[in-house]
């Protein structure tokens, strides 16, 4: 069935050829009427077959075409009975009635719901109609009417036909600017209208007082117009021609396409062109001047309407583009560009709060970026519930948000704590419920300094808030306010990061090893690896001087890998010489929540053939308590591998031994602050005693740090403490000197123990 349109197109071409090939006029007239009637039938059949959404439009086109066919029949009948057709005749009634009906059907195909946006297409059509009407009147109609002008029915008919063509030409301008142009059926209809208008124009310029029914070249246009209408109706794409459901601005934009603008420009120049031609021809101005004046006035009004529409469209597009440029696509909040503009508007009176989601990377890595985006949207919604209309809420980048206002519109302290209170409630994200924490940094702009430095610029203010956020994360305070010391710290940190990177690549780092003594056997059973940095300045830096800086960046990862591999490599060399020691390595808070730590440990153990139980990883009490759930998960994996886990500096944090017992650890290292004073301070002695007894009950071993004298070591042995380390038992020493130190210490401890026993 879909091939019917091809068959009909072929038969239509054959009919056109036969119209001129048959020997008799009567047969030719019958073929002409038959082609027209077939177009009406094809339109009705195509409408029933394809069931387009706008059936009314197609049936109206069929009705208009049918009236033309009726006019053809009447025309041929009059010619057959009278030998010629006078002008006007009854056929003209059917022809002239058919035009507006046919045109109305075409308009139904391309019309949009009547809004202001439809006015643009109508104005385009009106401009073309006025211009073509002027040309037709001056060069075709008026010469044919002569000096008598419009007189009687014949004169009205002579004017009516060009008027109908002008009407169709206006619709053709509407067709060209429509969005349904992609449909083949639509293009075929456009060709049918174009051919009809061109044929009518040729016929109008050769008007005679009486019409003849003999075949002429003009009839080719009318016949092929019929065929094109039928093919358009039978083609399957006719069901795709429907009123477009688009925004008014988009519909208005469609009326400003390049072909349309070219046509409108040419139409607008019609009046001066006609005036120039008539002046050159020396035609009396009384005959054409009034027509040019009326049409020029109408064109000016219509062009002003189109310019108004264009300016309104450009304004709307500008507003939308500006809104899109200032809006974050994911959350719908303001973006950095809009935030910078607001800061400039506040003219130095700006308070900025930066909200940074804690451990957002872990959410992305665990659940994927899709859920991570949902988290960002949920956070944005939660923050919207905190701010008022006077405060701008923006998304800076990634998981960082900003709240911007003036000193009068926001109390930063109250607002920061309100944000923390709101974030205490869990977030429902998709099918999951997540507890999301955030850190808040506060930066306040001030007027330019005495030196002229502008401290109220957007970059400077955002930098202040970011520094405050970093401070809040580092101190676990959740909220921090910017102060000038952060600037000095940051510059020093940047310098140190560069130097530390160089240190990793140029062997400026060194590991020292401090012995750990088993207090029952009084022999050295292990060592703790301690990192030192031989700075180019000539000083030796302890880890406390540079590890905090490394922890706030990604540098802590290669630094930990360096310590781990160097320590295990050294242990394997000692083992080859017969010195088999337990080796302890410290890991930071950042390491504890780094997914790559497990693989780092596994790779190092395998590379240096170290049994997992001979490696102890020391974690500070504070870092373990930062996120007990996450720490438990990571430490459980290490424990399952066989690695020993110790809580370092126990007693200086805020956890209880009962809570520590829930962590998969095997050892506690009591802080030197308690061990060093136990011989002289009964309170410290009581703390050490209770810790050793409770740890023993829970199945944990205890290592005492800071053993500085014989008295402290003796007291620890009496308490049955497991291990001890300190200056009394050996200072941190280099790897090449450690075997000698271990041998000397073992000998000294045996002698001292033997003397006491004897």
Image (tube, rainbow, N blue to C red):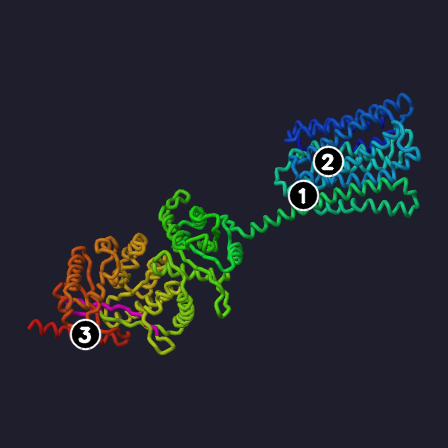
Whether residue 55 is visible, yes or no, is yes
Residue at the farthest left position: 758
Measured in 3D between alpha carbons, the distance from the residue under mark 2 to the one under mark 1, in whole angstroms, is 19 Å
Q: Give whichever of discs 2 and 1 has the lower sequence position.
A: 2
475 left or right of 58?
A: left
Q: Total marks drawn? A: 3
Mark 1, mark 3: which one is toward the viewer?
1
Residue bearing mark 3: 745
Which secondary structure is most common in the magenta stretch? strand
- Residue 466 in the image: state x and y as whole percent: 43, 60
Q: Which mark is residue 189?
A: 2
Q: Which residues are magenta?
A: 516-533
State if disc 3 and disc 1 touch (CB < 8 Å). Answer: no
Front in this rendered view, residue 479 or 161: 479
Q: Quadrant of residue 14?
A: top right
Measured in 3D between alpha carbons, the distance from the residue under mark 2 to the one under mark 3, in whole angstroms, is 105 Å
Please tell me whether residue 60 is drawn above or below residue 362 in the rendered image: above
342 left or right of 411?
A: right
Q: Give whichever of discs 1 and 3 has the lower sequence position.
A: 1
Mark 2, mark 1: which one is toward the viewer?
1
Q: Quick one: SS at disc 1?
A: helix
- Residue 531 in the image: state x and y as whole percent: 31, 70
Front in this rendered view, residue 171 or 70: 171
Q: Which mark is residue 254?
A: 1
- Residue 266 in the image: state x and y as whole percent: 78, 46
Q: Quick one: SS at disc 2?
A: helix
Whether residue 242 is visible, yes or no, is no
């Amino acid at each position: 069935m879909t091939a019917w349109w091809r068959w009909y197109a072929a038969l239509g071409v054959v009919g056109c050829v036969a119209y001129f090939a048959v020997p008799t006029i009567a047969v030719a007239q019958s073929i002409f009427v038959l082609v027209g009637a077939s177009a009406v039938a094809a339109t009705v059949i195509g409408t029933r077959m394809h069931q387009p959404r706008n059936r009314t439009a197609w049936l109206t086109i069929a009705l208009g075409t049918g009236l033309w066919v009726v006019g053809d029949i009447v025309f041929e009948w009059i010619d057959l009975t009278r030998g010629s057709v006078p002008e006007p005749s009854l056929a003209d009634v059917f022809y002239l009635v058919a035009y507006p009906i046919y045109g109305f059907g075409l308009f139904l195909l391309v019309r949009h719901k009547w809004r202001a946006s439809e006015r643009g297409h109508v104005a385009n059509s009106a401009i073309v109609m006025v211009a073509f009407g002027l040309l037709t009147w001056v060069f075709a109609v008026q010469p044919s009417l002569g000096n008598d002008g419009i007189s009687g029915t014949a004169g009205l008919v002579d004017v009516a036909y060009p008027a109908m063509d002008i009407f169709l030409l206006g619709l053709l301008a509407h067709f060209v600017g429509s969005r349904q142009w992609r449909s083949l059926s639509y293009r075929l209809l456009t060709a049918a209208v174009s051919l009809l208008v061109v044929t009518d124009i040729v016929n109008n310029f050769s008007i005679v007082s009486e019409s003849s029914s003999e075949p002429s070249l003009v009839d080719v246009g009318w016949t092929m117009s019929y065929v094109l209408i039928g093919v358009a109706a039978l083609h399957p794409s006719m069901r795709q021609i429907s009123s477009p459901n688009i925004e008014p601005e988009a519909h208005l934009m469609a009326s400003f396409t390049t072909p349309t603008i070219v046509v409108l420009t040419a139409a607008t120049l019609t009046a001066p062109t006609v005036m120039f031609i008539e002046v050159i021809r020396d035609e009396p101005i009384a005959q054409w001047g009034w027509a040019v004046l009326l049409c020029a006035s109408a064109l000016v009004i219509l062009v002003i309407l189109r310019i108004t529409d264009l300016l309104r469209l450009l304004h709307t597009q500008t507003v939308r583009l500006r809104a899109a440029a200032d809006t974050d696509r994911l959350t719908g909040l303001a973006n950095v560009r809009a935030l910078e503009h607001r800061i400039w508007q506040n003219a130095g009176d700006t308070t900025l709060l930066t909200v940074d989601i804690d451990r957002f990377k872990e959410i992305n890595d665990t659940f994927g970026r899709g859920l991570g985006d949902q988290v960002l949207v949920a956070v944005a919604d939660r923050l919207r519930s905190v701010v008022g209309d006077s405060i701008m809420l923006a998304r800076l980048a990634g998981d960082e948000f900003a709240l911007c206002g003036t000193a009068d519109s926001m109390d930063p302290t109250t607002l920061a704590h309100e944000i923390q209170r709101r974030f205490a409630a869990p977030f429902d994200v998709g099918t999951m419920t997540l507890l999301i924490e955030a850190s808040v940094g506060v930066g306040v702009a001030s007027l330019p300094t005495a030196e002229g430095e502008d401290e109220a610029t957007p970059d400077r203010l955002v930098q202040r808030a970011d520094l405050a956020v970093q401070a809040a994360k580092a101190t676990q305070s959740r909220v921090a306010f910017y102060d000038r010391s952060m600037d000095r710290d940051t510059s020093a940190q940047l310098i140190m990061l560069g130097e530390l990177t160089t240190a990793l690549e140029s062997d400026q780092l060194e590991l020292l090893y401090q012995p750990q003594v088993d207090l029952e056997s009084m022999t050295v059973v292990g060592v703790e690896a301690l990192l030192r940095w031989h700075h180019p300045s000539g000083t030796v830096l302890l880890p406390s001087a540079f590890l905090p800086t490394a922890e706030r960046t990604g540098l802590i990862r290669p630094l930990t890998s360096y310590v781990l591999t160097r320590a295990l490599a050294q242990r394997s060399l000692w083992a080859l010489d017969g010195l088999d020691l337990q080796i302890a390595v410290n890991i930071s808070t950042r390491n504890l929540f780094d997914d790559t730590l497990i693989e780092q440990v596994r790779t190092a153990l395998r590379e240096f053939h170290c049994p997992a139980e001979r490696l102890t990883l020391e974690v500070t009490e504070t870092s373990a308590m930062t996120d007990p759930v996450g720490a438990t998960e990571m430490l459980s994996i290490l424990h399952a591998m066989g690695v020993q886990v110790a809580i370092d500096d126990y007693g200086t944090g805020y956890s209880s031994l009962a809570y520590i017992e829930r962590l998969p650890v095997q050892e506690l290292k009591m802080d030197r602050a308690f061990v060093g004073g136990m011989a002289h301070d009964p309170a410290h002695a009581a703390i050490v005693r209770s810790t050793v007894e409770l740890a023993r009950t829970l199945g944990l071993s205890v290592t005492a740090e800071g053993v500085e004298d014989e008295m402290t070591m003796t007291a620890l042995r009496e308490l049955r403490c497991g291990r001890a380390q300190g200056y009394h038992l050996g200072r941190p020493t280099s790897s090449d000197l450690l075997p000698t130190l271990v041998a000397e210490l073992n000998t000294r401890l045996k002698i001292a123990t033997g003397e006491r026993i004897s």
